[in-house]
Amino acid sequence: MATNNKTINVGEGYSVNITAYLDAVITHQDQEMRNSAFGDKSLMSQEDLKNFYERIEYASAHGMGIVINVSNHPSKGWGMPQIQACGDSVIVDMPFPNINPNAEADELDVACYGFADWLISTVNGKVNKDRVTFVIAGAQGALFRIVGFLKMAEYAVMEATSERNTTINADGSKTVRFDFVRFRSF
């Protein structure tokens, strides 16, 4: 339930500033660099952000692990083998940010550090660090930076591996299906 246009109440007296991942968490406080690398659009709607925090709070309250899926492949589209590979952990989806292909390396550094810092802040003190896994897929330059920051903070970071199955159709087009195989550590 919204308490004003910037804050949502996610239960038990816990409120969240919905713009935190857009500007407040960037350690360097350099909004222009962040906007240049990621653009001005929100990653999540207010409702999706509320659900994100509620799922983290649920995992915390029940002593469960958490898998934060940072990709543009929401877990609702995962097959049973991929879901089962997460064990008893709560799966939480976070879209991978859109990356400006014209962003300079230093702009991407600042934006990715801020994003990784925000990801860490969502679980820090709520879920034991050894019960948190980030599954990440996205643009290579940002992926490299985000994974590096999360690894420096000593979090488990994984990628989903898959087998590519290609069928050549009668009209010459291709149909490609990726079948999940396992999670692999970065």
Image: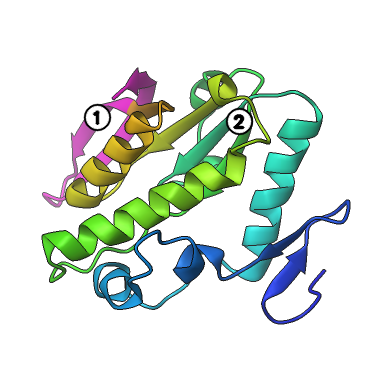
Whole-percent x and y of residue 144?
A: 22, 41
Q: In the rendered structure, which amino acid carries the disc numbered 2?
A: Ile
Q: Which residue is mark 2?
A: 66
* 90 to the left or right of 67: right
Q: Is residue 177 magenta?
A: yes
Main secondary structure along the magenta-highlighted residues: strand
Q: Which residue is mark 1?
A: 165
Q: Residue furthest bottom?
A: 5
Q: In the rendered structure, which amino acid carries the disc numbered 1?
A: Asn
Q: Are marks 2 and 1 in contact (CB under 8 Å)?
A: no
* Observer able to see residue 96: no
Q: Residue at x 55, y 46 (%)?
A: 121
Q: SS for tag 2?
A: strand
Residues drawn in magenta: 161-186
Identify whether 168 is placed above or below 186: below
Q: Crowding at label 2, few (<14), some or many (≥20) Cα neighbours within 10 Å?
A: many
Whole-percent x and y of residue 182?
A: 38, 18
Whole-percent x and y of residue 10?
A: 78, 57
Q: Residue furthest front?
A: 28
Q: Residue at x 12, y 66 (%)?
A: 104
Q: Is residue 167 magenta?
A: yes
Whole-percent x and y of residue 51?
A: 70, 54
Q: Residue furthest right?
A: 12
* 95 to the left or right of 37: right
Compare marks 2 and 1 and give the one earlier in the sequence: 2
Residues 172 and 179: in front is 179
Q: Which mark is residue 82?
A: none
Q: Crowding at label 1, few (<14), some or many (≥20) Cα neighbours within 10 Å?
A: few
Q: Split into 4 quadrants, where in the image is the C terminus?
A: top left
Q: Split into 4 quadrants, where in the image is the N terminus?
A: bottom right
* Observer able to see residue 118: yes
Q: Residue at x 21, y 36 (%)?
A: 167
